[in-house]
C-alpha cells in the first residue's frame, strides 16, 4: 500500500516540544487522538479531544504507569497487516481497531544518568512500552506511520496537508528507519550504562558503539574514499566534533584527524603557561611554551618551519590578535583554541579558507575511556593512554644527575614524545622542541632525523648552532642499543629520559656515563601507532 489515510493516532511523548501544534494539525484532518498520562493532559489543556488508552484497551493504567500500552488492542492495531484477510478477521473478532500513526519519544534515560540520579531513578527511566510501540509501528510501516523525533513533525504535517491526510510509503520507510535507529541507540545506551557504570566492566561482553552522524565529508583520507564524522551520543569530552567553527571551509577527514592530534597534545599543557602545538599528518612538528602565545607560536614554528606550512595549530589559551597576525603570515589549515578575541577574529576574517575552531575548554588528558581501532574481521579495544609519570618518582640511573633545567626539558620532551608516532625521539630545550623524529622503523633513525631537522631549522633561522646543543632527548620506548642514545649525544643532548627495561640497559647506561649524559628512567612506555 502506497498512500495511507491517517484516521487514528496514538501519542505518548516524554518531550512535549511541538506536541500541541501536531495535535492541532491532526485534529484538523479529522484524526482520532489516543494518548496517555501527561501527553493526554497537555493535549486536553490545548482544547483537543483525546481518548485515553485505557478506554481503548479496557484496562486502566497500572503499576505506576509501567503497564498501559502493552496490550493486544494496541499492538494488534499496530501490527495487523491490513490487506491480509486472516489478520483483518482476527482484528474484527477481537474488536481491535487499526492505529495508523504512532508518535512516541522515549523516557529521558541519558539525561537521567547525566544529572547524577541514583540507581532506582535510572532504572525507572528505562522505557518499555515506548520502544515496544515504536518497533511494532516501524515493522508494519507498510500501513503505519511512526514518528520518534519532534524535528519530523513538520514533515508529517506538510505531508498530511499536501495529500488529504495521507502519508506516502517513502515517508513511512524513512521514518521507520529512523525509528529503529532510535530504539537501537536507546537500548545501546542502557546496555552501556549497565556494563560500564553499573557492573564496572572495562571490556563488557558486548560493546555497543553509540554514534550519530554529524558532517558528511567531501572525501576520506584520499579522494577515492568516502567519509563522514560521527559524534558520541550522550556526554563527551570537549573535542573537535563539539567545537564551534567560527570561519573557514568545511573540515576534511584529514583536518579532523590532525586537529584531534593537536588538541590531545595541547591538552597535556592546559594548566601550563601559554603553549602552542603545530601538527602535520597527525605528528607534532613543533611545540613550545613561553610567556605569551605569540612567543610560544614563534618558538614552535622555528622547530620545523618547512613542516609547519599547511599545518594544524592548537593553543592552550584564547587566541589574541598578535598571535593571529603571526599565524596568518603563512598558510595554515586549522587553528584550534579555547576561544579567540575580536582582534584575532578580525585578522583571520581576511583568510576565508582558514578554519578557526573554538573548543570552550580543553579535554582532560587524564580522563578515562576506550581507544578503538578497526582491523580486518574485528576491532582492537584498549584503555586510553592517560598514563602520567610522577616527576618525584623518576629514577636517575647515571652517575650525573640532571640539572633543574635538564629535568624540566626532559619532562617537556617526554610529554611531547607521548604524542609522536613510534619510534619517537624528541629533543627539547628551554620549553621548546628542538627536533622531532617520528614513525621510523628503528630508534636510531628517529634520533638522526630529529637532529638533522634541528640543524636545518638552525640554518634557516640563521642561528650559530642547532637547539639540540644542550638539549634533553626523550624516547617513547627504551633504547634497545646504545647507538640511538649516542646519536643524541652527538647532536648535543646532555640529558635523556626513557622508560628503561631493555636487556641492554646497563650497556646504554654505561654509554650515557661515558658521554657524561644525565639519564632518567620513567618506567612507563608510550608507543603510538
Image: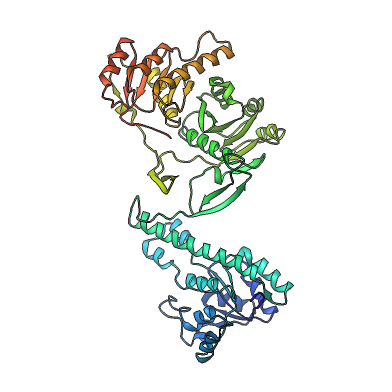
Numbered label tally: 0
Query: On the rendered image, what quadrant is the N terminus found in?
Result: bottom right
State left or right for residue 377 relative to residue 394. right
Question: On the picture, is 415 further left or further right than 350?
Answer: left
Image quadrant containing the C terminus:
top left
Residue located at (57% from left, 36% from top):
337
Residue 447, placed above or below residue 237: above
Asked whether 322 or 529 is in front, the reply is: 529
Q: Is residue 175 above or below residue 400?
A: below
Name the image colouring: rainbow
Give coordinates of residue 334: x percent, y percent. Answer: 61, 35
| Residue at the image position 65 percent from the left and 25 percent from the top | 330
Please tell me in which quadrant of the rendered image residue 19 appears: bottom right
In this view, the residue in front, 463 or 41, is 463
- Residue 233 visible here: no
Q: Is residue 349 visible?
A: yes
User: Which residue is outermost to the right?
Assistant: 162
Near-viewer residue (496 or 345): 496
In screen coordinates, is 388 left or right of 451? left
- Percent position (x, y) of residue 72? 47, 83
Which residue is farthest bottom?
Answer: 93
- Percent position (x, y) of residue 180? 52, 65
The percent position of residue 50, horizontal first and vertical second, equals 59, 82
Could you say which quadrant of the image residue 150 lies in? bottom right
Q: Residue at x 44, y 46 (%)?
A: 376
Amino acid at each position: 500500500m502506497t498512500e495511507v489515510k491517517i484516521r487514528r493516532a496514538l501519542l505518548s511523548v516524554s518531550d512535549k516540544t511541538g506536541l500541541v501544534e501536531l495535535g492541532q494539525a491532526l485534529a484538523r484532518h479529522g484524526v482520532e487522538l489516543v494518548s496517555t498520562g501527561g501527553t493526554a493532559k497537555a493535549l486536553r489543556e490545548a482544547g483537543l479531544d483525546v481518548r485515553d488508552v485505557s478506554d481503548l484497551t479496557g484496562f486502566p493504567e497500572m503499576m505506576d504507569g509501567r503497564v498501559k500500552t502493552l496490550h493486544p488492542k494496541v499492538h494488534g492495531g499496530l501490527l495487523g497487516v491490513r490487506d491480509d484477510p486472516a489478520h483483518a478477521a482476527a482484528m474484527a473478532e477481537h474488536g481491535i481497531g487499526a492505529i495508523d500513526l504512532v508518535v512516541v519519544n522515549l523516557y529521558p534515560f541519558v539525561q537521567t544518568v547525566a544529572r547524577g540520579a541514583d540507581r532506582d531513578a535510572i532504572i525507572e527511566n528505562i522505557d518499555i512500552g515506548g520502544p515496544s510501540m515504536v518497533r511494532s509501528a516501524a515493522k508494519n510501516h507498510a500501513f503505519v506511520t511512526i514518528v520518534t523525533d519532534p524535528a519530523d513533525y513538520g514533515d508529517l504535517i506538510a505531508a498530511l496537508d499536501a495529500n488529504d491526510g495521507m502519508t506516502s510509503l517513502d515517508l513511512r520507510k524513512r521514518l521507520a528507519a529512523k525509528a529503529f535507529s532510535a530504539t537501537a541507540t536507546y537500548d545501546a545506551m542502557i546496555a552501556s550504562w549497565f556494563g560500564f557504570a553499573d557492573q564496572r566492566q572495562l571490556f563488557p561482553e558486548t560493546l555497543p558503539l553509540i554514534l550519530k552522524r554529524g558532517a558528511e565529508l567531501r572525501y576520506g583520507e584520499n579522494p577515492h574514499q568516502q567519509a563522514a564524522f560521527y559524534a558520541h551520543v550522550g556526554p563527551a569530552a570537549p573535542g573537535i566534533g563539539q567545537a564551534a567553527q567560527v570561519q573557514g571551509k568545511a573540515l576534511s577527514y584529514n583536518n579532523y584527524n590532525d586537529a584531534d592530534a593537536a588538541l590531545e597534545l595541547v591538552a597535556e599543557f592546559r594548566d601550563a603557561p601559554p603553549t602552542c602545538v603545530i601538527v602535520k599528518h597527525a605528528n607534532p612538528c613543533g611545540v613550545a611554551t613561553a610567556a605569551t602565545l605569540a612567543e610560544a607560536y614563534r618558538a614552535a614554528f622555528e622547530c620545523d618551519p618547512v613542516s609547519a606550512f599547511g599545518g594544524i595549530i592548537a593553543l592552550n589559551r584564547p587566541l589574541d590578535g598578535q598571535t593571529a597576525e603571526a599565524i596568518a603570515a603563512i598558510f595554515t589549515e586549522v587553528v584550534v583554541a579555547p576561544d579567540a578575541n575580536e582582534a584575532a577574529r578580525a585578522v583571520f576574517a581576511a583568510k576565508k579558507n582558514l578554519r578557526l575552531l573554538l573548543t570552550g575548554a580543553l579535554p582532560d588528558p587524564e580522563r578515562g575511556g576506550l581507544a578503538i581501532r578497526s582491523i580486518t574481521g574485528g576491532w582492537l579495544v584498549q584503555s586510553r593512554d592517560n598514563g602520567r609519570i610522577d616527576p618525584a618518582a623518576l629514577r636517575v640511573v647515571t652517575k650525573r644527575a640532571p640539572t633543574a633545567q635538564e629535568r624540566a626539558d626532559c619532562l617537556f620532551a617526554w610529554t611531547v614524545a607521548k604524542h609522536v608516532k613510534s619510534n619517537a625521539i624528541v629533543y627539547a630545550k628551554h620549553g621548546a622542541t628542538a627536533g622531532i623524529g617520528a614513525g621510523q622503523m628503528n630508534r636510531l633513525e628517529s634520533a638522526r632525523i630529529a637532529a638533522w631537522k634541528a640543524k636545518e631549522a638552525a640554518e634557516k633561522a640563521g642561528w650559530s648552532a642547532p637547539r639540540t646543543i644542550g638539549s634533553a632527548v626523550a624516547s617513547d620506548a627504551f633504547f634497545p642499543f646504545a647507538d640511538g642514545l649516542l646519536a643524541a649525544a652527538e647532536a648535543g643532548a646532555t640529558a635523556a629520559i626513557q622508560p628503561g627495561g631493555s636487556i641492554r640497559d646497563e650497556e646504554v647506561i654505561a654509554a650515557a656515563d661515558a658521554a657524561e649524559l644525565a639519564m632518567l628512567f620513567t618506567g612507563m612506555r608510550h608507543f603510538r601507532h
